[in-house]
Amino acid sequence: MSARFRIPSLTEIEYVQEDDPCVIRPFSAATVPPLKDEVPHRHDFQTIMWTWTGSSTHLIDNQLITSSPGTIHIIARGQVHLFVAVSSDFTGHFVRFEDDFLPEVSAPAIKNYRQSLFSGRRSGQLLQMEQKEAPAYQTLLAEMEEEFSNPDLFAQQDTLRYFLCVLLLRLERSFRRAMPQPEIPLSITSSFQDFISMVEDSFMSEHQVSYYANALYLTPGQLTSISKQAVGKTAKQVIADRVMVEAKRKLQFTNLTVKEIAFALGYVSPFYFTQAFTRRSGMSPSEYRSQFRQPNL
């Protein structure tokens, strides 16, 4: 299918073609590809970016984010990303990893923190590190980079997995310091993350709360209660939000017609899709596309 009608993944256009399930790299203005060659691309892995000097501007879905020295930002799996601008003195680090790279025996809390970092609450937000945090991150990233660069080391992959666990815990600590939120029982967050994972897998065909509740051995009421405790939204709202995020991506970054998008997202009629989209976004799909459409499509 023509790239104009779908969003290519980063690995299809990647300037650094790597199959590793976890990659740690420094990068700078000199290593970022020419911006004229950049195209919107979908990340099929989780990505964390640190900025040490200079600045860079990114379009993540329909949100512009400009990094500055001492900031961290996250690009979650599935989000659409585009480098927009990079200062000549920009330097930073990135870590990207596949979800199943984390060790299977890792504590449930670590998997929950991974989900909270990348499920939408944290992704797209710019975190300003405290002055004392930057050296700790730089030391940990340097150790991870050294490990990554020496694949023949004994237990190299396992060592990287546990470094990644430490990194995610530190990130969650940093976000909690900068953006405090009420403590939620682990049982609630665990159940909610199971729900989010199912939504991510099935939202294009399944829009009913009952489908997810049945799969999780819960009643729709129980699932809605869990969702409201976790993020302050009903389960129905969480599903609808995910559908709308994908609708906006397709309107903004592809040439699919509104009718094609409606059917791709599981609507029985373009009318119902247009009605739902307009109600939630305050404009019709065509109006949204006209306002946010990316050039060169």
Image (tube, rainbow, N blue to C red):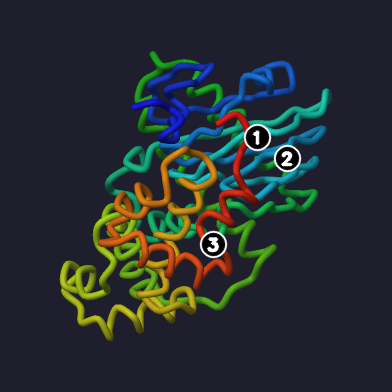
* Lower position in the chain sequence, tag 1 or tag 3: 3
Q: Where residue 5 appears, x then y in whole percent? A: 41, 34
The residue at the point 73 percent across, 40 percent down is 135
Residue at disc 3, secondary structure: loop
Residue at disc 2, secondary structure: helix
Mark 1 lies on residue: 139
Q: CA distance from mark 1 to mark 3?
A: 27 Å
Give, as a three-letter code, the residue at label 3.
Arg
Q: Nearer the viewer, residue 96 or 5?
A: 5
Category of crowding for the residue at label 2, using alpha-carbon neighbours closer than 10 angstroms: few (below 14), some (14–19), many (at least 20): few
Q: Are marks 1 and 3 in contact (CB under 8 Å)?
A: no
Quadrant of residue 81 within the rendered picture:
top right
Q: Are marks 2 and 1 in contact (CB under 8 Å)?
A: yes
The residue at the point 16 percent across, 74 percent down is 217
Above or below for 173 versus 3: below
Asked if one can make out residue 130 in the rendered structure from this viewpoint, the answer is yes
Q: Nearer the viewer, mark 1 or mark 3?
A: 3
Quadrant, the N terminus: top left
Give, as a three-letter code, the residue at label 1.
Thr
Residue 15 as seen in the image, left or right of residue 206: right
Q: Nearer the viewer, residue 58 or 257?
A: 257
The residue at the point 41 percent across, 16 percent down is 151
Q: Nearer the viewer, residue 23 or 135?
A: 23
Give, as a three-letter code, the residue at label 2.
Pro
Quadrant, the C terminus: top right
Asked if one can make out residue 166 in the rendered structure from this viewpoint, the answer is no
Q: CA distance from mark 3 to mark 2?
A: 26 Å
The residue at the point 66 percent across, 66 percent down is 179
Q: Where residue 295 appears, x then y in whole percent? A: 63, 34
Residue 86 as seen in the image, left or right of residue 47: right
Mark 3 lies on residue: 121
Q: Where residue 116 appears, x then y in whole percent? A: 47, 60
